[in-house]
Amino acid sequence: MDAENFSKDSDAEDYFSGNQIGMTLNFSMNKDIHGKGTKGLSYSYDVSEEGYTGANIKFEKVQNWSGAKGIKMFMKKDTSGNKAVIQFKEINGEYWETAIAMDKDETGEVYIPMSNFKQPAWGGKVDGKLDLSQISEMSLYINEVKGQTKVKHGTLVYDDIEAVK
């Protein structure tokens, strides 16, 4: 996901399908904070009602990430105490996810090794084996962390999200 692919805010809104169940999640182009190009994707959220919110990217064509050692992205974190969840789904319905603590105001490149991705308890195992050759969806969520969340709303910036070898 590269924010350069969006010419206006509504392009980003159309690219993601939300899972917002009573929560707020908005996307907008950010020309001040970004990775390699000239704009990043601001991701404004509010988890006040359900404790989480997120958006899914359903790839038009199944992605083959075979050989990828991790996920690399540009990210501007907030200090909310929430966690940013990066998730992907295999074509067989098996989910894998990991979380990034939102406890420091940091901006820059983030690298997440594939070994950090685990199956969520709610996801239901299919075969329990990570198959990077059949990725059908990727999701970006924000989850409240009981006892650590200080603020239930904020804005992150994402850009240049890719599987890397």
Image: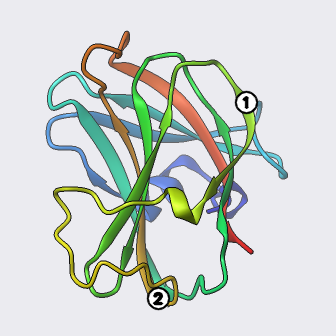
Crowding around mark 2 (Cα neighbors within 10 Å: few <14, some 14 to 19, many 20+) is: some
Give the left or right position of residue 163, taking residue 139 as reference.
right
Task: Give the residue pinned by disc 2.
Answer: 62
Task: Give the residue pinned by disc 1.
Answer: 107
Q: How was the colour assigned to the protein in this rendering?
A: rainbow
Q: Amino acid at mark 1?
A: Thr
Residue 117: percent from left, percent from top: 46, 60
Q: Could you tell me which secondary element the residue under label 2 belongs to?
A: strand
Residue located 30% across and 53% down the image: 18
Residue 92, placed above or below residue 117: below
Q: Between residues 30 and 34, which one lies in front from this camera angle?
A: 34
Q: CA distance from mark 2 to mark 1?
A: 30 Å
Quarter holding residue 72: bottom right
Residue located 21% across and 30% down the image: 51
Give the left or right position of residue 119, taking residue 63 as reference.
left
**Quadrant of the rendering where the C terminus is positioned:** bottom right
Residue 84: percent from left, percent from top: 45, 39
Residue 133: percent from left, percent from top: 51, 90
Q: Are marks 2 and 1 in contact (CB under 8 Å)?
A: no
Residue 52, placed above or below residue 164: above
Q: Between residues 119 and 57, which one lies in front from this camera angle?
A: 119
- Residue found farthest to the top: 150
Quarter holding residue 95: bottom left
Choose the circle earlier in sequence order: 2 or 1.
Answer: 2
Give the left or right position of residue 124, taking residue 119 as reference.
left
Quarter holding residue 1: bottom right
Q: Amino acid at mark 2?
A: Val
Crowding around mark 1 (Cα neighbors within 10 Å: few <14, some 14 to 19, many 20+) is: some
Q: Between residues 130 and 4, which one lies in front from this camera angle?
A: 130
Residue located 45% across and 85% down the image: 131
Residue 132: percent from left, percent from top: 51, 82
